[in-house]
C-alpha cells in the first residue's frame, strides 16, 4: 500500500511540475496555441486581427491578418536554440511567386 501511495505521489508531483514549470509540453504538441500566444503578444501584430492561420510544414506557418481594410500576409517560422528555448521569426510576405 505504501508503494502505491508513493508512486501516485511522485506522479502527481511530476504532473504539477510539467504544467506549472517553465517547460510546458502542451505547447510542444500544440504549437498553434503557442503561435497564437506569440501573435497576440508580438509588437508587429499589434492592432491586427488574425484572419487565417495555416500550418505549412517544418515549423512554418502562414498567418493572414487584417487591420481595418488592409490585409497583410506573414510567414512565421519556429526555431529552437535548445531543447527548451523556442523562438519565432516573422517575415512579411511581399509577393507570391508560384502558389501551390
Image (cartoon, grey):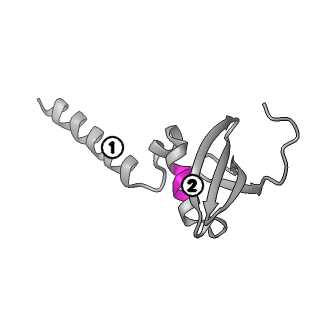
Position of residue 10 in the picture relative to residue 87 (left or right): left
Which label was assigned to residue 31? none
Which sits earlier in the primary sequence, circle 1 or circle 2?
A: 1
Give x and y (percent) for residue 82: 66, 49
- Image quadrant where one finds the N terminus: top left
In the rendered image, the vertical position of residue 31 relative to residue 42, given as above or below: above
Residue 49, quarter of picture: bottom right
Position of residue 39 in the picture relative to residue 27 (left or right): right
Q: Main secondary structure of the magenta part?
A: helix
On whether residue 58 falls in the magenta region, the answer is no
Q: Residue at x 42, y 55 (%)?
A: 21
Which label was assigned to residue 50? 2
How many labels were placed on the picture? 2
Looking at the rendered structure, the secondary structure element under dot 1 is helix
Looking at the rendered structure, the secondary structure element under dot 2 is strand
Q: Residue at x 61, y 66 (%)?
A: 68
Give x and y (percent) for residue 47: 58, 69
In the rendered image, the vertical position of residue 77 relative to residue 43, given as above or below: above
Q: Residue at x 85, y 49 (%)?
A: 95
Residue positioned most to the left: 1
Residue positioned most to the front: 69
Q: Residue at x 57, y 51 (%)?
A: 51
Q: CA distance from mark 1 to mark 2?
A: 33 Å
Structural crowding at the residue carrying mark 1, measured as other residues with C-alpha within 10 Å and reported as few (<14), some (14–19) or many (≥20): few
Q: Which residues are magenta?
A: 34-38
On whether residue 37 falls in the magenta region, the answer is yes
| Foreground disc of the pair 1, 2 | 2
Work out whether residue 4 or residue 63 is closer to the camera in this orientation and state it: 63
Amino acid at each position: 500500500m505504501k508503494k502505491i501511495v508513493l508512486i501516485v505521489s511522485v506522479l502527481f508531483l511530476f504532473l504539477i511540475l510539467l504544467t506549472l514549470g517553465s517547460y510546458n509540453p502542451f505547447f510542444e504538441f500544440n504549437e498553434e496555441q503557442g503561435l497564437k500566444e506569440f501573435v497576440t503578444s508580438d509588437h508587429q501584430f499589434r492592432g491586427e486581427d488574425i484572419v487565417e492561420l495555416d500550418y505549412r510544414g517544418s515549423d512554418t506557418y502562414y498567418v493572414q491578418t487584417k487591420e481595418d481594410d488592409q490585409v497583410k500576409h506573414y510567414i512565421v517560422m519556429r526555431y529552437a536554440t535548445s531543447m527548451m528555448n523556442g523562438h519565432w521569426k516573422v517575415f512579411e510576405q511581399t509577393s507570391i511567386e508560384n502558389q501551390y
